[in-house]
Amino acid sequence: METIKLGIIGAGNVVREYHLPDFLKVKDVKIEALCDVDIKKAKKLVKLYKLNTTKVFSDYKNLIELDLDAVSIATPNYLHCKMAIDALNSGKDVLVEKPMAISMREADRMISTSQKNKRILMVNQKSRFTPETEAIRKIIRDGTLGNILNIGMVTSHKGPNAKWFFQKKYSGGGCTIDLGIHAVDSIRYTVNTEAKEVVCFAFTMRKNIDVEDNSFLIIKFNDNTFATVESSWCRNPGEYSIIINCEKGSLRIGPYTGYKIIMGRNKSRMSRVLNIPAKSKYGNLYEYFIKCIRTREKPITSGEVVQKSLEIVLAAIKSARTGKIIRLPTGR
């Protein structure tokens, strides 16, 4: 099998903990280059993972000039659009961290560039690649519990380490765009309809930051299903939980279930723990990206697909700022 030549832009925590180790587990993938404006960080990772033949740059443009098949982008959010477009225009397939962009116009440009160049644009919306999400989606889509009445999700941790997350010009928003977007995308992947209205309440507990660190988002879908997403950077330990109430029963998963899926039926006093596969049917997200490069199949988290998740989150941020209900789709 032909080796896929990959370049990674960024050398922060997400690259150290996920991109590098997970790409290195994929057969016939070679990390040709690593880039970070702080070249010392890039060199440390090269040494840590013993990437003796990997080139190191401080300017991403030097990286995308190489003969590469693909580029993985894990940089501050405001850089995603420009870096992705430059990589796509140079003939590379692209995996970009969430959020794909910090505005809908940026996302539009990224998508049109990928289409023009016939290149893959995949977004790292990792919640779609968990066996739990797949199991819940199957139960809902099969109609086992009837129509959804409402969904509640909580996603939280103690907050990011990098300072740029707390500056809106670099991040595009706070916990809502950082954590909430995972929950929003998971909900969209589960339900069989799209959102039509969004309202959000947000506030900031920390000092000296200009983004929200707590938010409560309400989404109304076209079939009048409601979903709520609670996001926070102020909780330790963190939490990721889901409650789905349906006509015939409910599903729930979270720390109170030992992160196992519990299903209950309205006609029974008993509930049961569902058996779920050990891994996603798509495999590891990074493995799946490489598969898409080889087969040329469209990713389940393509730019076109997850742009609507970004739209909901951006509408939420606008709602919190203006105090108004935001109707979808929004203008550009």
Image (cartoon, helix red, strand yellow):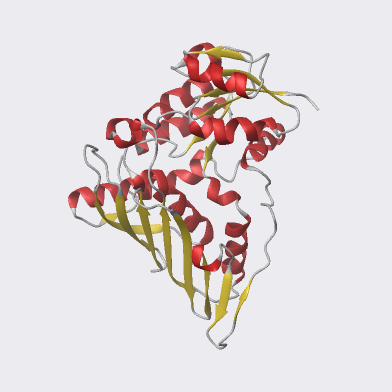
In the rendered view of the protein, which quadrant contains the C terminus?
Answer: top left
In the rendered view of the protein, which quadrant contains the N terminus?
Answer: top right
Q: Is residue 277 left or right of residue 86?
A: right
Q: Is residue 179 visible?
A: yes
Residue drawn at (41%, 47%) of the image:
179
Q: Of all residues shown, which one is farthest toward the right? A: 1
Residue 28 position by quadrant:
top right
* Front residue of this view, candidates 276 and 106: 276
Q: Is residue 309 left or right of residue 202?
A: right
Percent position (x, y) of residue 317? 28, 47
Residue drawn at (39%, 58%) of the image:
195
The answer to whether 139 is drawn above or below residue 86 in the figure is below
Percent position (x, y) of residue 233? 35, 48
Residue 172 position by quadrant:
top left
Q: Is residue 120 visible?
A: no
How many numbered callouts?
A: 0
Residue 7 position by quadrant:
top right
Residue drawn at (60%, 52%) of the image:
130
Q: Is residue 231 left or right of residue 113?
A: left
The answer to whether 151 is drawn above or below residue 144 in the figure is above
Percent position (x, y) of residue 286? 63, 37
Percent position (x, y) of residue 217? 33, 57
* Front residue of this view, candidates 87 and 297: 87
The answer to whether 323 is drawn above or below residue 9 in the figure is below
The answer to whether 27 is drawn above or below residue 277 in the figure is above
